[in-house]
Image (tube, rainbow, N blue to C red):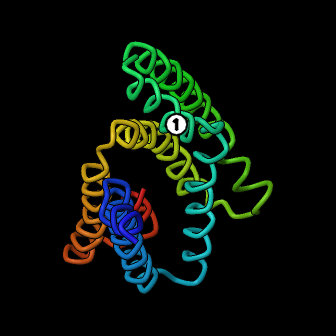
Amino acid sequence: MSELLRLATGKTARHTLISVVGTVSYGVLILTFIIVATNYLSPEQFGIFSIALTFYNLVPDLFSLGTSQAIVRFVSVYIGTNQPEKGFRFAQLIFLTRLTAAGFIIIGSILLSPLIAQKIYHQPLLAMPLLLAILFAASSLLVDFYQNLLRAYERFTTTAILAVIAGSLKLIALGSLIFFHQVSLLTICLAFF
């Protein structure tokens, strides 16, 4: 019983709780953003926003190449075994991989967004939101690197706070758009991405 109590009140339990609270808070903020934003979009615009949002979420997953888990796993192991220089080199390699992937994403988005919008979806209005979504997905790849690096260094509170700040800033941007009567599909995309 004392072992169970020790596990429930230990460092891992605290880190898990902090991560869960940060993730849930961010999720609630994003859900609130989407609910409020969709009230200002027509059904056609909502469909376009949904496609752009899908690309924004899928592109980093496809191009991260499993490095998110590798950062947390291997960098933290090297730090824990008192080999921070190996952890630094490993993180540096992953960063360069992500930076290269972000470059390919940026070039690809400029070249492919209009083609995807017109040839696959037959919706020219999708071109600019899709371009924005994929461009910001490239930056998301780099942000994810730093979030996972913070996790590797066991900075769970910092990671959770940054996630809540990011979600809050998106909502503040949307609120500003509404207040100044500047709500459109593109401005919502800019506020979200």
- Counting the numbered discs, the total is 1
Q: Quadrant location of residue 12? A: bottom left
Position in image of residue 184 (x %, y %):
40, 71
Q: Please name the amino acid that badge 1 sits on.
A: Arg
Position in image of residue 141 (x %, y %):
50, 40
Q: Residue furthest front?
A: 1
Report the residue at 40% width, 37% height from top: 152
Query: 128 or 52: nearer the eye?
Result: 52
Report the residue at 52% width, 52% height from top: 133
Position in image of residue 128 (x %, y %):
54, 53
Q: Is residue 26 visible?
A: no
User: Is 161 drawn above or below residue 145 in the view shown?
Assistant: below
Report the residue at 25% width, 53% height from top: 157
User: Is 18 drawn above or below residue 69 in the view shown?
Assistant: below
Q: Quadrant location of residue 14? A: bottom left
Q: Is residue 138 left or right of residue 88?
A: right
User: Is 79 drawn above or below residue 158 in the view shown?
Assistant: above
Q: Is residue 35 visible?
A: yes
> Secondary structure beneath disc 1?
helix
Q: Residue furthest right?
A: 119
Which residue is tagged 1?
73
Query: 79 or 46: nearer the eye?
Result: 79
Q: Quadrant location of residue 30? A: bottom left
Quadrant where the N terminus is found in the figure = bottom left
Quadrant where the C terminus is found in the figure = bottom left
How crowded pointer 1 is (Cα within 10 Å; few <14, some 14-19, many 20+) is rated as some
Report the residue at 46% width, 45% height from top: 140
Position in image of residue 61 (x %, y %):
62, 48
